Amino acid sequence: KRRNVPTGTRKNVTPESLVPFDAPIQPRKYRMPSTTSRKELPVTFSRKRTRAAATGEDEEEEASPTLSEEDAIKSKRLQNTLAARRSRKRKLEYQRELEDAIESERSEKEMWRARALVL
């Protein structure tokens, strides 16, 4: 009997088949701009308002990221990508441990069932 309940993992994926930690980050190839890439500057990197912006002067000036902010954004994305890779691997290893434990319990149950039938 098939279950149509989502499990959160794909079938036949092992921790060894995942992208290694030291693999290069793939470039973004969007057909349309993604929701997150549309933003000029992520919220976590938004700068404090300048005195001119606080007083209402030069309101047309857009906040574009400086070179150091772009480096910070790239390093933050790299950290996030690596953390996601580690998390996926941990999840699959934990799931594999659970499946192995279930299998050993089943085999132990069968062994005790056979022993009970003999007696």
Image (cartoon, rainbow, N blue to C red):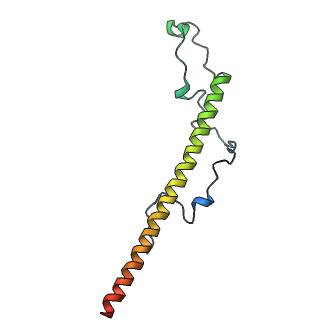
Which quarter shows the N terminus?
bottom left
- Which residue: 55% across, 19% down? 47
Q: How many marks?
A: 0
Q: Which residue lies furthest to the bottom in this view?
A: 118
Q: Which of 103 and 6 is in front in this view?
A: 103
Where residue 88 appears, as percent x and y from the top left, is 54, 52
Up/down of 30 relative to 44, above or below: below
Up/down of 52 relative to 119, above or below: above
Residue 12 in which image quadrant: bottom right
Which quarter shows the C terminus?
bottom left
- Which residue: 52% across, 16% down? 48
**In the displayed structure image, the side of residue 85 where residue 26 appears, left or right:** right
Where residue 94 appears, as percent x and y from the top left, is 47, 59
Where residue 99 appears, as percent x and y from the top left, is 46, 67
- Which residue: 50% across, 6% down? 55
**In the displayed structure image, the side of residue 93 where residue 74 appears, left or right:** right
Where residue 30 appears, as percent x and y from the top left, is 66, 43
Q: Which of 96 and 60 is in front in this view?
A: 96
Residue 59 in which image quadrant: top right
Q: Nearer the viewer, residue 42 or 13?
A: 13
**In the displayed structure image, the side of residue 94 where residue 36 appears, left or right:** right
Up/down of 8 relative to 103, above or below: above
Up/down of 77 relative to 23, above or below: above
